[in-house]
Amino acid sequence: MKKLYKKLTDRYIRSFKIIKAIDLNTYQLKLLKQYGRLHKTFYISLLEPYKRRAGEEPPGLVSLDKNDRYQVENIRKERVLKGKIQFLIKWVDYLKYQNTWEPPEHLEEYDELLKEFRIRLERVETAKRTLGY
C-alpha cells in the first residue's frame, strides 16, 4: 500500500489464518485473492497475534488496486548485475534520484513499457552503428 509518508503506513493489513507452520519461525498464511501478489510465507517477527477488543469490529479489507501502487513513468536503462537483468525505473511523481533498479518480475504488468524501451534501445544501437560509434 502506498502512503504519502512511510511512517504513516499501516504496520499490519488485517488478520489472516495460519495454514501451516513451515518451521519454528516461518508460517504460511491463507491470503485473500486480492493479495495474490504477496508471498504467502512470513517470518514470525512479521506476524502479530490478533486480539479483538470488546465491542471492536474486525478490520476491513485493504484495497490493493492500481491507484494504491507505485506507478512506472518509464524505463530508463537496463543492466546485468550478478547475472540477472535489472531495469532503471522512473516512478510517477518521484524525482530522478529516487529511480530504482528493478528485476523484470516486478514489471510484469508493464509489458507495453518494456516493449517501448526495447524499441528505443534498438533505435539507439542502430543510430550508433550508422554513425560509426
Image (cartoon, grey):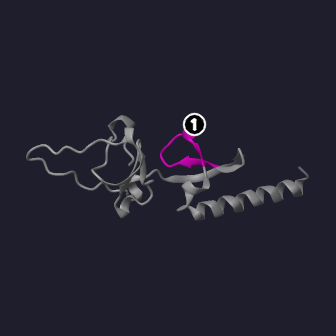
Q: Can you give x and y, in whole percent of width and height, for residue 20 in the image?
A: 37, 54
Q: Check residue 98 for magenta coloring.
A: yes
**Which residue of the protein is positioned furthest toward the front in this rendering?**
24
Q: Nearer the viewer, residue 3 or 15?
A: 15
Q: Identify the residue position indicated by label 1 in the image.
A: 97
Q: Check residue 74 for magenta coloring.
A: no
**Amino acid type of the residue that numbered disc 1 sits on in the rendered structure:** Tyr
**Which residue of the protein is positioned furthest toward the right in this rendering?**
132
- Other-residue count near label 1 (Cα within 10 Å), few / some / many at <14 / 14–19 / ≥20: few
Q: Can you give x and y, in whole percent of width and height, for residue 94 in the image?
A: 50, 42
Residue 3 sits in which quadrant? top left
Residue at left offset 88%, top offset 49%:
133
Residue at left offset 41%, top offset 41%:
25
**Which residue of the protein is positioned furthest toward the left in this rendering?**
55
Q: Is residue 9 left or right of residue 90?
A: left
Q: Is residue 6 above or below residue 36?
A: above
Element at badge 1? helix
Q: Which residues are magenta?
A: 87-102
Number of numbered markers: 1
Q: Is residue 111 left or right of residue 29?
A: right
**Which residue of the protein is positioned furthest toward the top in this rendering?**
7
Q: Is residue 114 left or right of residue 123?
A: left
Q: Can you give x and y, in whole percent of width and height, for residue 64 in the image?
A: 37, 56
Q: Can you give x and y, in whole percent of width and height, for residue 37 in the image?
A: 45, 58
Residue at left offset 33%, top offset 56%:
63
Residue at left offset 76%, top offset 60%:
122
